[in-house]
Amino acid sequence: GTALPYSASSKNSLITTDCVSCVEQEDPNRKAEAEANGEYYYEELKISDACTEMYEAAGKCETNLAATSKYTEAITDACSYIAGIKISRSNGVLDKSMAKGSKVATAFIVIFGVAFVGLAGFVYTLHKKIMDAKKAPLLD
């Protein structure tokens, strides 16, 4: 067989590492029209709408960024999320040395485990009693 496209052995990937420019592309027709009319054409660089929307939607942790004016504040909405990412390595495996155990989560796991084993035992004893009752009828 041949290697599948985009597999590890084919060295191709669906995800590229190329950067995409956020500078909005200027209209080549407007530049050509201006030059044809003998006019000087200059267009300011503009940020594309896609990049602007992506930046606005992105999580920000500006704890060490001083406010630039009295009307702006540092945005710290995503600081806890970013701190959670820090415990994972570049290969995606969690680094357990930085992670902390939760006592509440541990308690719930233990309670759930004990309840599960207890209910399983109760169901087994009920099942055993029903089977014993079927073997020895009451009207003999």
Image (cartoon, helix red, strand yellow):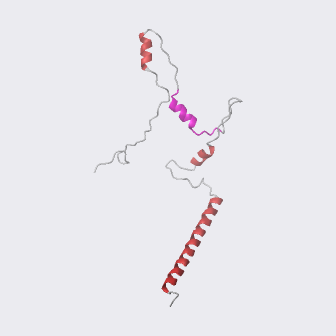
For residue 53: magenta? yes
Percent position (x, y) of residue 47? 52, 27
Residue 21 locus on image (x, y percent): 48, 30
Report whether 76 appears left or right of 2.
Answer: right
The residue positioned 51% from the left and 52% from the top of the image is 93
Give me the residue at 40% from left, 42% from top: 14
Image side of residue 9 versus residue 125, left or right = left
Q: Residue furthest left?
A: 1
Q: Residue furthest front?
A: 139
Which region shows up in magenta? 47-62
Q: Would you identify the image quadrant in which residue 68 lies? A: top right
Residue at screen point 62% across, 43% down: 79
Residue 137 in percent (x, y) is at 50, 86
Q: Residue furthest bottom?
A: 140
Answer with left or right where residue 118 lies relative to residue 2: right
Residue farthest right in this picture: 70
139 left or right of 15 in image: right
Q: Is 138 above or below relative to 101?
A: below
Q: Nearer the viewer, residue 21 or 131?
A: 131
Tell which of 40 and 139 is nearer to you: 139
Q: How many numbered marks are there?
A: 0
The location of residue 63, given as percent across then percent down, is: 66, 39
95 shown above or below 126: above
Q: What residue is rendered at 62% in x and 59% in y? A: 105
